[in-house]
Image: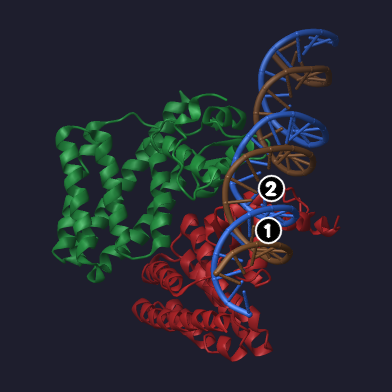
Chain colours: A green, B red, C brown, D blue
Amino acid sequence: MSEEQSTAGTPEPGDVAAEAVADRLRERISRGELPPGLPLRDAALAAELGVSRNTLREAVRLLVHEGLAVHRLYKGAAVKRLDVGDVHDIYAARRCFELRAVEESVYASEEALAALEERISAQEAAARAGRWNEVSTWSLDFHRAVVRLLGSRRLDRFFDTIVAQLRLAFAEVPRQPEFQMQWVPRDREVCDLLRTGRRAEAAEALRRYLDDSERAVVDMVRAAAARRET
Amino acid sequence: MSEEQSTAGTPEPGDVAAEAVADRLRERISRGELPPGLPLRDAALAAELGVSRNTLREAVRLLVHEGLAVHRLYKGAAVKRLDVGDVHDIYAARRCFELRAVEESVYASEEALAALEERISAQEAAARAGRWNEVSTWSLDFHRAVVRLLGSRRLDRFFDTIVAQLRLAFAEVPRQPEFQMQWVPRDREVCDLLRTGRRAEAAEALRRYLDDSERAVVDMVRAAAARRET
DNA sequence: ACCCCAGGATTGTTCATCAATCCAGAGTTT
DNA sequence: AAACTCTGGATTGATGAACAATCCTGGGGT
C-alpha cells in the first residue's frame, strides 16, 4: 500500500519477485546502505519494499545462501560481518581464480583482453576525477574480467558472490580516498603485463597485489572490530 | 494425508524447514531419484514432504540458485538437464580448482594428504566388492578432498555444488559398472604422485584425467539427448 | 544489587485466497 | 481428416492473516 514500490517497477521480464527483491537488497548491502551487523527484520523490510513477508523471507534466504547475511534460529537474519578468517578464506578463493586465469591467459580472446584495458582506463579516469567509490568499483570489475578469461559462467557467478562479500569489509570503514589511490597503478601493472603476454610476470605482480590487498583488508576488518569495542 | 513426513522428523537443531527440505530434494536429485527434466510441482511435492507449499517453494528456489533446477515463469521448476555447454563449463571450473590445488599442495597438511589416501582406499575396496555407485561417490569425495587442500570453506562449498551438478549427467544414463571401473587407477595415480610430493607429475596426470573424464561425460550427455529423441 | 517472570515483539510455518498463465481436449472450420 | 480456436481446469506467483515457538525487555519481589 505504500507508494515506495514505485522503485520496484523494474519488471525484469521473466524474473520473479523474490529474486528481484534479493537483487535490491544485495545492491543496498554492497553500497553500505545496509551495514554489516544490521538485523534484517522481515516485517519492516517487507513493508518498505512493498512485498509480502513471505516473498521477502525467500529473498533473505537467498542472501544467506550467498554469504551476504547470516541467520540464527528465532533471531532472524542480519547483514554478514566479516571476521579475519573470512578475509583469508576469500583471498584463498581469489588466488585460486585470478592466478589461474592469468596463467591460462594464453587462450584469451582479443575482446577479453580489450575488456581488461577498458576497465583499467575507466578506473584511472575515475581516479583523476576524484570519484573514489567508482574507482573501487572499476577495480573489482577489472578483476571480474580477469576471472572471465577462464571461460566459465559458473566461476564468474561465484566470483560475483566473492566480490559482494568483499565489499562487506569496505562497508564498515569510512571512505579513504588516499587508500583507494594506491591500488590504481597496481591493477594497471597487471593489465599491461597480461596484454603483452608476459604471463609469468603478470602472475607474480598479481600475487603481490593480492598479498598486499589481503593485509589491507584484514587491517580494515580489525579496525572495524576495534571501533565496535569502544 | 500421507504419513510420509515421519522421515522429515530430523529436527536438525538450529536448522530451518526450507533448508532441510532443500537438503532432502538435493539428495534425491543426486541419487537420480528425481531425474533431469522432471517438473517439480510444488503442491504435490509439498504434500509428499509434509511441508507447506510456501516452504517447498523456498527450498526449490535454493536449488535453482545452486544450478540443480531451472525455472521458467508460470511453468515452474524442473530438475536441470545438462547440455554439452554445461559440461564444458563445469570442467573449466574443475580444472581451475583441482589443478591449482595440486600445484599448491606444498602447503598441504599431513592429515589432508591422509584424507586423500583414505578415500582412494575406500574407492578401491568398493570396486573390488562390486559396489559401483559407491565407487563414483568415493571418487568424487577424493576430488573434494583435493580441493580442500586449498583451505577455503567457500571454495569447498562451491565445489560441492559443482559435484552435485555433475551427478545430473550420471542420473540420466544407465549404470555401467565397467565404465566406473576405468577411473579407479587414474585417481590412484594422482593420489600417489601427490603424496610423494611430485606435484608437476600429479598435475599432469590430473589434467589428463579431467580431459578424458570430460569427454566421457560429454558422450553421456549426448547419449541421453539422443535417447530422448527416439 | 540480584533473580524471576509476564507479556509484547519477532520469527518460523502454515493456510486460504486470488490473479495470471498454461495446457489438454472439445468443438469448429476447411 | 487436418488444422484452428476456444474454453475450463490445473498450476504458478504472490499476498495477507493466522498461530505456535522463541526471544527479549522491563517491572516486581527479594
Camera-side residue: A227 or B107? A227
Whether residue A8 is situated above or below residue B92 in the rendered picture:
above
Q: Is residue A149 visible?
A: yes
Residue under the point 42% across and 55% down = A157
Q: Quadrant of the N terminus of chain B?
A: bottom right
Evaluate whether label 1 is on the same chain as label 2.
Answer: yes
Where is mark 1, residue-wise?
B41
Residue that numbered label 2 is attached to: B55
Classify A44 as above or below A100.
above
- Chain letter of mark 1 equals B
Looking at this view, name the residue that lies furthest to the bottom: B178
Q: What percent of the width, then of the height, locates residue A118?
A: 19, 51
* Placement of the C terminus of chain B among the 4 image quadrants: bottom right
Q: Amino acid at mark 2?
A: Thr
Amino acid type, mark 1: Arg
User: What's the residue at 74%, 58% (across, down)?
Assistant: B44
Q: Is residue B43 left or right of residue A195?
A: right
Relative to residue C4, is residue C8 drawn left or right?
left
Dividing the picture into quadrants, the one containing residue A166 is: top left
